[in-house]
Image (cartoon, rainbow, N blue to C red):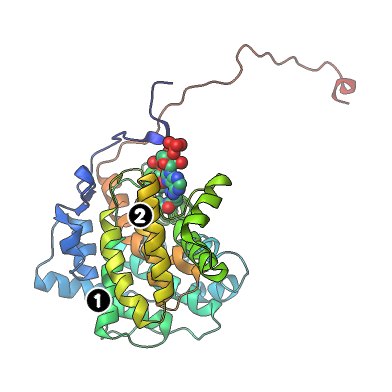
Amino acid sequence: MDYPRGLAGVVVDQTKISSTAGAHLTYAGYPIEELSEASFEEVVFLLWNTRLPNEQELYDFRADLVSKMVLPAETIRLLLYIAKEPQHPMSILRTTTSLLGTTNDVEHDEPPKILAKMLTAIAAILRIRDNEPLIAVDPNLNVVENFLYMIKGKRPDRKLTKMFSSVMILQADHEFNASTFTARVVASTFADYYSCLTAAVSALKGPLHGGANERVFEMIEEIEKEQIDPKDFVELQLKKKRKIMGFGHRIYKNGDPRAFILEEIAAELAPETGNKQYLKIQQALAKYMLERFGLHPNVDYYTALIYHCLGLDKSVFTMIFATCRTAGWLAHIMEQRRENCLIRPNSEYVGPTNQHYLRKESEEDYK
Ligand SMILES: CC(C)(COP(=O)(O)OP(=O)(O)OC[C@H]1O[C@@H](n2cnc3c(N)ncnc32)[C@H](O)[C@@H]1OP(=O)(O)O)[C@@H](O)C(=O)NCCC(=O)NCCS
């Protein structure tokens, strides 16, 4: 075997959207640390056009997105039924994403409408599961304010909006991560946007990718509830040959640049929302993981606490990640379509050879 498993380190194509070169995350050349201060719409525009918008373009882009944060009546009717089911919210979202692509008017849907519908659909899933009435978009609010308004039923203040915008921006894109690559594979066959997004949501669901944030919080809750020393918890998990969720990364071996900013946000939010105890556990666990294994927290580690501080149930954490990542998925689907080459790698066959199928002679031979 002289090839890297899991495509580790393999450059499969070029992109102008984002880069992790030198373990620095940039979107179209701009460092993520600076972009986390921008507005969400500015960053979506950047990912889709590889340049920042001017003032008028930003105004128009924002107004266009907000005006499209509406779901067709038939989607709502079906969502009211599907979202109540006991399945995991990511399974509901997977079906919903596919559903968004099957209403009558979708043939000509373009990325602004698709992104707007995805955000509204995610907010609707949350509300329906909480037995709360759906909230209509407010044209006077921006995209992030509207999303928070539609999930909480209350217009968010400036501080919350700014914090959540940063969280969304930090997770908006990450070059050829598993779900984005999945979306690009599907896009490379020239399948429609919704098919690409449904596949991306499916890949994000797994615990080695977006599904890690839910497991992080499960772990922190267990440590808190059982009053276990984080060090003992780690050792016990490793004895059971289990990974510690929220640690390690395929690319960032010396720390995930997003996690540094997310830790600051979590550190601000946790005391304000009565969740200091979880932050303390997370920081102690992170210290031990670094000392003992040289492993750093990744993007999912502190977002788990941030989402908890926002009053969200852990079962919907990965769906919130999908809210943030949809903009990036769409950027990559568009780029793949523009510069397309079918993604179809080879494999090394290691199964049996020289097998022969002998045709059965009579009915009796089948018994
Ligand atoms: C993200 C992840 C899949 C990266 O995987 P990868 O690049 O294939 O790296 P590996 O899983 O091969 O890890 C390399 C080594 O570090 C160890 N390691 C990596 N992450 C670990 C973790 N979270 N807990 C314990 N050990 C870990 C592996 O066991 C492996 O050790 P070994 O060489 O002795 O076998 C991996 O770190 C992981 O599973 N993390 C937990 C899940 C998670 O948080 N996912 C979200 C990613 S953003």
All told, the count of numbered labels is 2
Residue lying at the far bottom of the rendered structure: 154
CB at disc 1 and ligand 1 closer than 8 Å: no
Depth-wise, is mark 1 or mark 2 nearer the camera?
A: 2
As drawn, 93 above or below 140: above
Q: Can you tell which quarter of the image residue 320 is in? A: bottom left
As drawn, 224 above or below 188: below
Q: Is residue 268 left or right of residue 313?
A: left
**Point 54% across, 80% down: residue:** 130
Three-letter amino acid code at the position of disc 1: Lys
Q: What distance separates the C-alpha of mark 1 from that of mark 2?
A: 22 Å
CB at disc 2 and ligand 1 closer than 8 Å: yes
* Quadrant housing the C terminus: top right
Dot 1, crowdedness within 10 Å: few (<14), some or many (≥20)? some
Observer-nearest of 88 and 282: 282
Rendering coords of residue 139 (x, y %): 28, 84
Q: Is residue 66 visible?
A: no
> Which residue is disc 2 drawn over?
298
**Secondary structure under the numbered disc 1 in the rendered image:** helix
Three-letter amino acid code at the position of disc 2: Asn
Q: Is residue 61 visible?
A: yes
Q: Can you tell which quarter of the image residue 358 is in? A: top right
> Which residue is disc 1 drawn over?
162
**Secondary structure under the numbered disc 2 in the rendered image:** loop
**Point 62% across, 70% down: residue:** 85
Q: Is residue 235 left or right of residue 44?
A: right
